[in-house]
Each structure stands twice: as C-alpha cells, then as structure tokens.
Image (tube, rainbow, N blue to C red):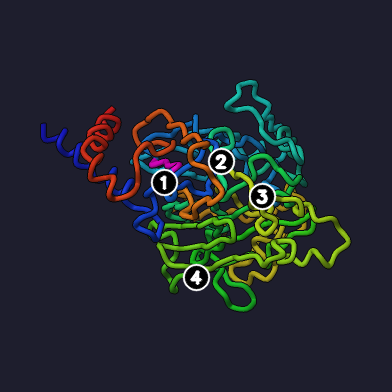
Amino acid sequence: MQKNLVVAFICISSYVKLVVSTPCSSKDFNKGAQWSVTVSTKGVAKPCELIFSDEFTEFDLETWSHEITATGGGNNEFQIYSNNRSNSFVKDGKLFIKPTLTADVRGEAFLTSGTLDLNDGAPATKCTNNRDSGCLRVGNDREIIPPVISARIRTVNSFAFRYGTIVIRAKLPLGDWLWPAIWLLPQSNFYGGWPASGEIDVMESRGNRKLTNNAGKEIGVENFGGTLHYGPHWPLNGFQKAHVEYNTKPDNGLNKDFHDYEMQWRPDGFTFKLDGNIVGNINPPKGGFWELGEFNRSNVENPWKYSKNPRMAPFDQKFHVVVNLAVGGTQGYFPDSTSTPNRPWENGRSQGEASLQFWKAKEEWYPTWNNSEYVIDYIRIYASETVDKTAKPSAIQPPTSAKSKGKSSGVSTFPTDISALKYFFILSVFNYIYNCKS
C-alpha cells in the first residue's frame, strides 16, 4: 500500500509538471476555437499544446530509429553509429548515449585490417547511409576504420513539425573531442539537398574541459551554440549570420548539471534559450534568409522565392528531431585556431587518415572520458502560441491522439490551459496513474 502511494505521488507530480509547465507567455493561450500555426505529422494543435513528449520511462523504438552508418556525419567524424544498448539505452527515466571503442569489441587489429560490413538484413540494424562508403569499409595502415562506436537517433519515421517550441533537458558529456548535439532536419527536403532545405541546430557543444581558441575564448564544455544552416546549394551556406552561443561561468561546465535547452520557432524567426533565459534571436529581414545570407550578390537562383512564407524559407516546412553524440571531425567544428589542448589530427584530411591520427593519441584523450555519457531527461515540443489567423476551425480536424504509453511520446490528449485543468484534473490524474503503473 505504501509503495503504491509513493508510485501514485511520483506519477501525479510528473503529470502536473508535464501538463502545467509550458514555455508560452500567455495564460489565455488555449481559449476559444483558435488554432496554432504549428502543423505536425499528428495534425493541427491549439496554441501551446504539448504535441510531442518523451520522458524516457522506456526506450520507445517506434518513436526513435537509429542511424546505422560509418559515413562520418558529413564532417568526416570518427564514429560508427550503431543500434546497440551499449551505446544508447534508457536507465532511471533518462536516455543515455555513450561512446565506446571499436577495438574493445573487434580488437585493435580490426581497425587496420578488418572489414566493417553494416549491411545487415534486419530492418532495425540495416545500414542507413552509404555516403562515403558508410556501409562497407576496409581498414588499412593509412586509413583506419572509425575507432569509436556511438549513437544517433531520430524521429524521421514517427514525428515531424513546423513551428513550435522544443525543450530538451540534458546533461552534456565530458571528454576531449566529444560533440553532443540535438537538431532538426527537414522531413522531405522540399527545396533540395543540403543546405537548400535547411538544418536547425538547437544545441551543439564540445566535451573538452578546457578548449580555447586563439582569441582566448573558451569553446569547450562551458560553451554551446545554436545555428541555422541554409543556402541555395553546397558550398553556399549562410550559417555564420545565423548563429548564437553562450558561455557559462568559468569552471561551471554544462556537464555538471542538467539544463533546459529551448528553441522557439516562429513564422518570423527563432529564439534560443538556456534555462529560460534568452541566449539570442535569429530574425531574418524582409528579404528572408536569401537576403540574410547575402546570396542576392551571387549569380544563383533563389530556391525559396515561390514559398508561401519566403521570409522564413527554407524553415517553413516540417522538420524531424535528431539526437546524437559524435566524435571529432575534419570540417572545422574543432577549429585550426584551437590552442589548448592540441588537436591530435589535421583538419582537411580524409576520415580514415584523421581517425588514425586521433587513435594514435588515445593515451591523451581517452583518460578524459570517465564521464562521457550524454544524458537526456526529457524532450518536449509545444505548438506555437502564434494563432493561425487564416485557419477556419470548422474545416480543420483536430490531431489524432497517439496510443498512450505511460509517459512516452505522442500528442497530448489533455488541454494545457489552467482553467480547463480544474475540470479535468482528477480524471487526468487517475488516467495517468494507470498508465504510469502499467
């Protein structure tokens, strides 16, 4: 009986926090018959309605699919992405992504003489990206097989949305050359290949305890950034003009505690926050991201000019969620200007060559990986509080509720305004207790 009461109390507390807490500023956000500008794969939503949540009481592989590849993430990174509970798992109500060494699984000789074949026949473990020989790789003395195994998960098969607020509560990993991130990728590449259809980096950081550039700025675990990638075609990319970042106080890295990383995505711009405090805004001018990126100075065609919202294009389409922990890379995220500690590989090298240089310095970086787990408490997405003034409520079908799975992901089946809660609170709590215990 006492145990049941404790379980009930935990469930009620969790539910109240989940439903009542909202990033919206208005208390009257859910009154009337108005609809948000947000659209998702679940349908339409009321302003500030919770449209997706994963509290990680279980690892829901119907929501999250793993990427299986050694392609290097487009940055010649040094990891193999795998679907394995050694690298991605749920424990104590939290998601863990943990890097491990390839040599611990296959032996060190495998790096220089083995064959990495990710072409498994099973759907859940089949290679997902063959770019740059990402599915089949043979190691040699000059270009080794990626020496680290990690995880990258995404909602590409289950959930995507356009406009809204995403909140991720996470504790970042500590370890030299680790690269944790949570980001959004376009669901359909509506405007073409990267970066024409955009990329939204909600949070990126580096795991080094002390990492400074030549200007003396700390760019390791005391720093994180949010970035938008966009451009008519590669290599044109205007990310330099769409970047915000934040530094903690010295010796108070983002690995020491959980923090709320929040990104508000509106029909006219973006706001990035840390623990509720604004880090920065990215608001395109009237000419949109075409003007912001100064692409009008080039002799290329504007792929976004026929968009219904040319000011926000390519960020006017649905995007899905990606969570990953990468290692290293040769395309500049760990820049040449890094002064301390010394980066053990040369940027501009091939993935295999740089991986070899990285592996030879293992005795320098591996001892720093004692707390290398990337831990996520929850991910929640709310509909934008901006009202769709063009919508006709009578002609719009409300979102279809997802099947309840305790606290796992899906559309909220409960109203989020306080006035409605006083009518439905008791019924909702008992329903939530039932799901939580089951």
Start and end of the magenta stretch?
51-55
- Pointer 3 or 4: first along the chain: 3
- Pointer 3 or 2: first along the chain: 3
- Classify mark 1: residues with Cα within 10 Å, few (<14), some (14-19) or many (20+): many
- Classify mark 3: residues with Cα within 10 Å, few (<14), some (14-19) or many (20+): many
**Relative side of 350 to 257, left or right:** right
Disc 1 target residue: 49
Residue under the image location 68 percent in, 71 percent down? 337
- Pointer 2 or 1: first along the chain: 1
- Classify mark 2: residues with Cα within 10 Å, few (<14), some (14-19) or many (20+): many
- Pointer 2 or 4: first along the chain: 2
Residue under the image location 54 percent in, 53 percent down? 180
Disc 3 target residue: 77
Helix, strand or loop: magenta stretch = strand
Disc 2 target residue: 160
Residue under the image location 70 percent in, 61 percent down? 289
**Kind of element beneath mark 2:** loop
Q: Nearer the viewer, residue 425 or 123?
A: 425
Residue 230 position, x and y percent, is: 71, 56
Disc 4 target residue: 247
Q: Nearer the viewer, mark 3 or mark 2?
A: 2
**Kind of element beneath mark 3:** loop
Q: What is the spatial separation of the Cα atoms under label 3 and label 2, in whole angstroms?
A: 26 Å
Looking at the picture, does residue 117 appear above or below residue 195? Answer: above
Examine the structure image and report whether residue 54 is included in the region drawn in magenta.
Answer: yes
